[in-house]
Structures are given as C-alpha cells and as structure tokens.
Amino acid sequence: SYGWLIVRHHEDGRLDESLNETGILHILFEDYGSSTGVMVSAARRGDNSTEGGKQASAAGSPSVIVQPDGKHLLVGNVVDEFGKMKGIVLRCNKDGSPDTTFKGRGAAIIELEGFTFDWSSSEGIALQEDGHILVCGHFNADEGQTAYVTRLTAAGEVDRGFNGGLAVTVFSPSLISLDAMTVRKSDGRIIAV
C-alpha cells in the first residue's frame, strides 16, 4: 500500500525505535485520501536547532519538520472524494501515532477559504515560536496560478488572526509557486520562496 514514509535516526545513524517501535513509520494515503507524493522530504531547519520552534521545510512535497515537543508536522497533498487535489497537514506524536489534539484525527486539509480553484498544492511548512503553523504552496484557477501562505493554529484550525483567516496570495497568469518557507529568528518575519 502506498503512503508517506518517515524514517527517524539517532545522530550516529541507528534507527530511533521510539518512532513506531522500529524507527520507521508508513502513513497510508488511503487513511486521508489518495496522494500525489510518495516520500517525505528531509527537513532543513532555519536555525539548525530544535530550540524555540523555528524550523522550516525543504522545498518539495511532502515535507516534514519536528516541533520542539518532538511531534512531527508533515505537509503534502491528497485528492479528496471529489477528485480535487488539496494540501494536507498531518501531526504525529513522538511515537508516530496521529495527534488527535490536531483537528481530532491528526490531519487538517488546506481548504483556502474564499478562493475558487481547480486544485491546490501545499509545498512548504514552518512553525512559529508560538506554535502557529505556516503553510505555503500554490493553486490553479481559470485565470492563472496563485501562490499562497496561510496559517493554522496549533490545534489545526484556520487562524482567523492571520489576514482575517484568508491566505495571503500573489497572482500570476503563468506558473508561480511558493515551495519553502522559514521564520526569521531575529524578528519573526515570514519568508517564503
């Protein structure tokens, strides 16, 4: 069965068996819809540490970061029951089990309220110091492509305090995307590329 694959190692390369008792976690696509991705990309941390939650994903989808409490945040894409591709954020506990404090099942679909689109893709993820989750990507509509940044609360809900709950967008009649992001440590500014 297809799915996302997480492999966690100790610094010396040994598998970290505190993840799923094996160091390997396979999250099945069928548990959340079908997916367009196959493997989790390695994380690139914005400040090379796990202190303070300032981490960011590498470009590519799906991507993963580790919260300061050891929980994993993954961003990728699934196809919903109507055949429309949308972004998804998953949060797993340190042992790999779904974090049910995150939207009740460990998963939040990126719906992009207020926008009409044919499909959307979530590519990058970053964690702010206060626990808010930033997601970037792009979506396609008849007029062209739009790159976006949106924010979720630590519980996986759309954050109404970030741009009134709407994604911040940049439109282009040609191909455009935001694929990775970070939070600048010095002042908390969000940088998406």
Image (cartoon, rainbow, N blue to C red):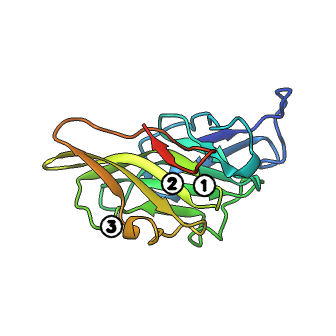
Q: Residues within 10 Å of mark 1 (few under 14, many from 20)?
A: many
Give the residue number, with chain letter if any, for mark 2. 134
- Identity, as a three-letter code, of the amino acid under mark 1: Gln
Horizontal and vertical percent for residue 27? Answer: 60, 49
Q: Residue at x 76, y 56 (%)?
A: 69
Task: Look at label 3 and name its amino acid.
Answer: Glu
Mark closer to the observer (2, 3): 2
Say which label, 2 or 3, has the lower sequence index. Answer: 3
The residue at 62%/45% (across/down) is 186
Quadrant where the N terminus sits is top right
| Distance in Å between CA atoms under marks 3 and 1 | 22 Å
Which residue is tagged 3?
Answer: 113
Q: Nearer the viewer, residue 19 or 166?
A: 166
Q: Secondary structure at mark 1?
A: loop
- Within the image, what quadrant is residue 163 found in? bottom left
Mark 2 packing: few (<14 Cα in 10 Å), some, or many (20+)? Answer: many
Residue 77 at x, y = what percent? 43, 48
**In front of the other: label 3 or label 1?**
1
Identify which residue is drawn at 46% across, 70% down.
161
Instruction: Point out the image quarter for the C terminus.
Output: top left
- From the viewer's perspective, tell me whether residue 59 is left or right of residue 113: right
Q: Nearer the viewer, residue 26 or 110?
A: 110
Q: Which residue is mark 1?
A: 128
Image spot of residue 26 (x, y percent): 64, 45
Q: In front here: 52 or 19? A: 52
Which badge, 1 or 2, is on the more N-terminal residue? 1
Q: Can see residue 3?
A: no
> Is disc 2 placed on a helix, strand or loop?
strand
Q: Is residue 184 above or below residue 99?
A: above
- The number of numbered discs placed on residues in the rendered structure image is 3
Left/right placement of residue 86 relative to residue 15 reads left
